[in-house]
Image (cartoon, helix red, strand yellow):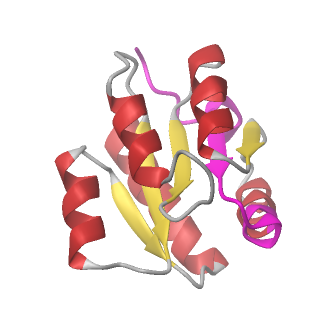
Amino acid sequence: MPWSCNPNDVRILIVDDDPMLRKLLRTTLRSLDHTNILESESGQEAVELCQKNPLDLVFLDIEMPGEMNGIAVLNELRQDERPVSIIMITAHSTVANVRQAAASKVNGFLVKPLNPERIEKVLEHFHQSRCA
């Protein structure tokens, strides 16, 4: 699958139960010309969206209420054959979280509180790894 370097062509999913964090990510992504953005507030909904939509990049919160936390979603997405880059978002960057995510081939981490500069750095890394 060829990766586009055009921000408008990058299909992104934001998964977090916090609406303010989703808004910060969405606003920052749009300021960087990313317009193809989906959002989910639960793990189960995220998995369903990923199954229905080809995605390039997922911002995924580790700690979410409900049946599926971020690690469960990550493991589910990694069973799919489609390549997707996954950036884990966490306020609790414990060794256990990092090990679990690394075992499932996560592509990066963002530690809360987020800011536009950190988000932009992650996007730069994504574009360098996929479009070079």
Q: Is residue 107 left or right of residue 13?
A: left
Q: Can you see residue 132?
A: no
Task: Name the quadrant of the N terminus.
Answer: top left
Count of numbered labels shown in the rendering: 0
Q: Is residue 15 magenta?
A: yes
Q: Position of residue 87 (x, y in %)?
A: 44, 55
Q: Is residue 16 left or right of residue 23?
A: left
- Image quadrant in which you'd find residue 11: top right
Q: Is residue 68 left or right of residue 9?
A: left
**Residue placed at 58% from the left, 78% from the top?**
117
**Residue placed at 51% from the left, 32% from the top?**
56
The image shows residue 63, relative to residue 130, as above or below, that is below
Closer to the camera, 26 or 111? 111
- Image quadrant in which you'd find residue 85: top left
Q: Position of residue 100 (x, y in %)?
A: 24, 57
**Residue placed at 47% from the left, 61% from the top?**
62
Closer to the camera, 75 or 39? 75
Task: Name the quadrant of the C terminus.
Answer: top left
Q: Can you see residue 18?
A: yes
Span colored in magenta? 1-23
Q: Residue furthest front?
A: 67
Q: Is residue 104 magenta?
A: no
**Residue placed at 75% from the left, 44% from the top?**
39
